[in-house]
């Protein structure tokens, strides 16, 4: 039986710096509350990874992970900024990022709205166990780039993840055999 858990929000929001401009207020991504992490970059400039973790999943042992949907609520300061997502990657339990980038490279809206990545049968190029998803290090990394203006600002209100899974079967052949004997 397919089950979903989520959408759940991160309990932790941080910068994962790798050469881009760090986000201001990364801890503001922990809820959908109109407080934003933001980053201002020059033309062609990119951000560090805004990383959300500690989603609090409790997928039961023995379940089969079928898909992961990520939603990021973001916008740009003005239509002329041409802010785009350039990196949307899963953060694995071992604190590394997956190799599948789900960025759409489309311009952010000027009004805060969710963009969806992945889905009901999308494993992001990874093999998952319930303990991988339940781990506090599991999460999402997100970075943006400014493609046009001399200075542009990207804003992220929150991230959320929904996990789709198939519950382990509760069928036990030993008990079935007992019923036949009765």
Image (spheres, grey):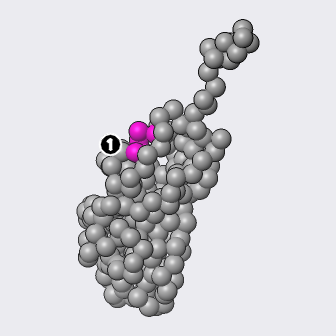
Q: Is residue 44 visible?
A: no
Q: Residue 2 vs residue 107: left or right?
A: right
When asked about the image quadrant of residue 154, the answer is bottom left
Label total for image: 1
Q: Residue 60 vs residue 34: left or right?
A: right
Q: Which residues are magenta?
A: 130-134
Q: Residue 104 vs residue 36: left or right?
A: right
50 or 60, which lies in front?
Answer: 60
- x and y percentages locating residue 34 in the rendered image: 39, 81
- x and y percentages locating residue 86 in the rendered image: 44, 67
Quadrant, the N terminus: top right
- Residue beneath the point at 57% across and 44% down: 165
- Residue beneath the point at 50% across and 60% down: 7
State yes or no: residue 177 in magenta.
no
Structural crowding at the residue carrying mark 1, measured as other residues with C-alpha within 10 Å and reported as few (<14), some (14–19) or many (≥20):
few
- Residue beneath the point at 41% across and 88% down: 77
Q: Give the residue at mark 1.
A: 94
In this picture, is 148 found above or below 55?
Answer: below
136 or 74, which lies in front?
Answer: 136
Q: Main secondary structure of the magenta part?
A: helix
Q: Is residue 175 visible?
A: yes
- Residue beneath the point at 35% across and 67% down: 30
Q: Residue 41 vs residue 114: left or right?
A: left
Residue lying at the far top in this picture: please name it.
181
Quadrant, the C terminus: top right
């Amino acid at each position: 039986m397919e089950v979903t858990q989520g959408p759940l929000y991160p309990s932790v929001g941080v910068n994962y710096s790798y050469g881009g401009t760090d986000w201001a207020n990364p801890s503001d991504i922990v809820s959908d509350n109109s407080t934003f992490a933001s980053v201002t970059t020059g033309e062609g400039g990119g951000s560090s990874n805004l990383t959300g973790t500690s989603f609090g999943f409790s997928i039961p042992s023995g379940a089969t992970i079928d898909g992961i949907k990520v939603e990021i609520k973001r916008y740009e300061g003005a239509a002329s900024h041409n802010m785009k997502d350039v990196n949307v990657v899963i953060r694995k339990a071992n604190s590394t990022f997956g190799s599948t980038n789900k960025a759409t490279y489309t311009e952010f809206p000027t009004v805060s709205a969710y963009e969806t990545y992945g889905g009901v049968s999308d494993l992001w190029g990874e093999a998952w166990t319930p303990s991988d998803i339940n781990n506090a290090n599991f999460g999402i990394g997100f970075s943006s780039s400014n493609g046009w203006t001399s200075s542009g600002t990207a804003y992220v209100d929150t991230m959320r993840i929904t996990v789709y899974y198939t519950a382990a079967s509760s069928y036990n052949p030993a008990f079935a055999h007992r019923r036949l004997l009765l």
